[in-house]
Image (cartoon, rainbow, N blue to C red):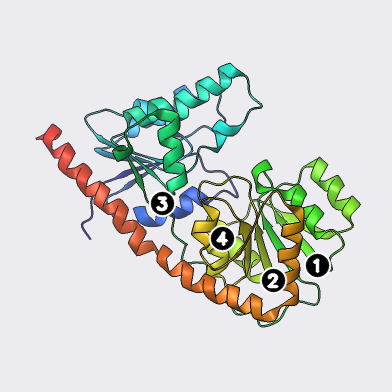
Amino acid sequence: MVTMDVTYIFRSRIPGTYSIEGVFEPIARQNPGSKFVYVPLIGNTLSNIIKNIRFCRAKQGRINHVTGDVHYVMLGLRSTNYNILTIHDCGVLMDQGRSIWKRWLIKKLWFTWPVLKADVVTTVSAKSKAEIIRYTHCPESKVIVIPNYVHSVFTTQSKPSLKSLPRCLHIGSTKNKNLPRVIEALSGLECELRIIGIVSTEDEVKLKESGILYSSIQDLSIEQMKLEYLESDIVLFVSTYEGFGIPILEAQASGRPVITSDISPCKEIAGSGSICVDPFDVAQIRRAVLQLLQNETLRHQTVQAGLINVQQYGMDRIAKAYQDIYERGMRETAKHHS
């Protein structure tokens, strides 16, 4: 593999967030000459956005890869360089809780203008590609689908039998992660609910009313997250919206049965290595949990299918796809700098 200088631009470091960094930092390390740039300011005030754009303008290289979240910094990059933008999903555009003015500004700063400025846009699923094209009206040829890969830290550890009180691991607590319906689905079942994320006051009330034994934790490192998977018996990821769904693959790589949503892209990513349910149907979620708790054969089959499925999401294959883009960038910038 040819190594080259790529400037990777990341969001500001926030404890407990590693999804974007976990994907691109290992890829970047395969290019010894690469540079890591982390924007200095957290928070999307107009002042912080402008300062982050100026910061990245001063740090840019010949090939720049904005790895996600801070799409707007593309506006500070020179067009004579080769600029790559990764958009993981368009979920922020689904939020109807903002004013029309704020929604317009978010669409322009995070999507329309950065996509226009980019030489190439990568995204993680066919669903996200379709959304990017719909919202920005960019040419289809400009958007390339490169799925996420599973970090090598997630390794299989067999679990032949359930705990005396089985642990259901729920990933995430934002609105799209569907925690209220999971709480309702587990009510009255002999199990423990482990939640990764900050539990809202409203959800905490629901948990106490349900009588479910639960605990929650947040701000985990990737190594700590690995242990959470291994300590679980079932992994629940029944989101109502996702751009990709990396926890599905992390759970499969860890050798745990997964219940996920029967929506794109979750069902495609999970393959046959999960039980897919309607995320809006509490009865379906509950039935799937009971099936896995009560049927050892089904648990084993789901785990084995997951282990096979996750093999197609290895790092080498994904890194090669990005490397091809960087090599294209080297050829293009050579024209401008010759």
Which numbered disc flags the more N-terminal residue, 3 or 2?
3
Amino acid type shown at disc 2: Asp
Q: Nearer the viewer, mark 3 or mark 2?
A: 2
Image disc number at residue 248: 4
Calculate the distance from the C-alpha at mark 3 to the C-alpha at mark 1.
Answer: 36 Å
Residue that appears at 66% across and 53% down: 278
Nearer the observer, 214 or 182: 182
In the figure, residue 191 lies in which quadrant?
A: bottom right
Q: Around disc 3, counting alpha carbons within 10 Å, would you say few (fewer than 14), some (14 to 19), or many (20 or more)?
A: many
Name the secondary structure under disc 1.
Answer: loop
Residue that appears at 19% across and 44% down: 330
Nearer the observer, 53 or 176: 176
Q: Is residue 315 visible?
A: yes
Which numbered disc flags the more N-terminal residue, 2 or 4?
2
Image disc number at residue 233: 2
In the figure, residue 299 lies in which quadrant?
A: bottom right
Which numbered disc flags the more N-terminal residue, 3 or 1?
3
Left/right placement of residue 236 relative to residue 66 reads right
Which numbered disc flags the more N-terminal residue, 4 or 1?
1
Q: Nearer the viewer, mark 4 or mark 3?
A: 4
Amino acid type shown at disc 3: Phe
Calculate the distance from the C-alpha at mark 4 to the C-alpha at mark 1.
Answer: 21 Å
Name the secondary structure under disc 3.
Answer: helix
Q: Is residue 306 above or below residue 61?
A: below
Where residue 242 appears, as percent x and y from the top left, is: 56, 47
**Circle 1 is placed at which residue position?**
191
**Circle 3 is placed at which residue position?**
24
Where residue 22 appears, as percent x and y from the top left, is: 47, 54
